[in-house]
Image: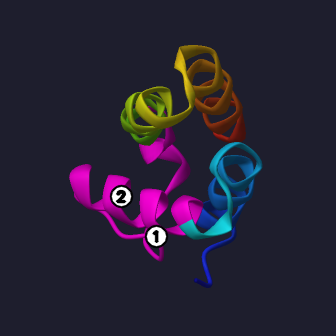
Amino acid sequence: MANPLAQQVEKILAGAVGDFIAKATVKKNCELIGSTPDSLTSAQLPELATHIEKSVSFFSGKETGIDVAEKIRNLAG
């Protein structure tokens, strides 16, 4: 994955769910918003964060999901 933005999202996620699940979560949630990890833009981060929040909340609890989503939204600047 060459896109630094997607790498940052993956790094945030890895802290909550581990590297393997983070990579799969970024890929799947990018697809849900009509993107790919390689073509992800900062304009897509808020929508991506919403989807990822739901995924992480399901597996790691609501607090973790909210925290991860907030960090991803903050990447948009």
Disc 2 to disc 1, C-alpha distance: 6 Å
Report the residue marked by disc 2. 30
Label 2 is placed on what type of residue?
A: Cys
Indicate how the structure is coloured in the image. Answer: rainbow
Report the residue marked by disc 1. 37
Residue that appears at 68% across and 58% down: 18
Q: Which portion, as a residue range, is magenta?
A: 21-46
Residue 62 % position (x, y): 53, 16
N-terminal of the pair, mark 2 or mark 1, is 2
67 relative to 57 in the view: left or right: right
Q: Relative to 22, is 46 above or below?
A: above
Q: Relative to 33, is 62 above or below?
A: above
Residue that appears at 26% across and 61% down: 31
Q: Is residue 16 visible?
A: yes
Label 1 is placed on what type of residue?
A: Pro
Q: Relative to 27, is 72 above or below?
A: above
- Local packing at callout 1 (Cα closer than 10 Å; few below 14, some 14-19, many 20+) is many
Q: Secondary structure at mark 1?
A: loop
Residue 18 belongs to the span the image colors magenta: no
Residue at the limit of the structure toward the top, as seen here: 63
Q: Relative to 42, is 31 above or below?
A: below
47 relative to 10 in the view: left or right: left
Residue that appears at 58% across and 29% down: 69
Q: Is residue 40 visible?
A: no
Which one is nearer the viewer's eye here, 19 or 44?
19
Pointers 2 and 1 in contact (C-beta within 8 Å): yes
53 relative to 22 in the view: left or right: left
Residue 39 % position (x, y): 43, 71
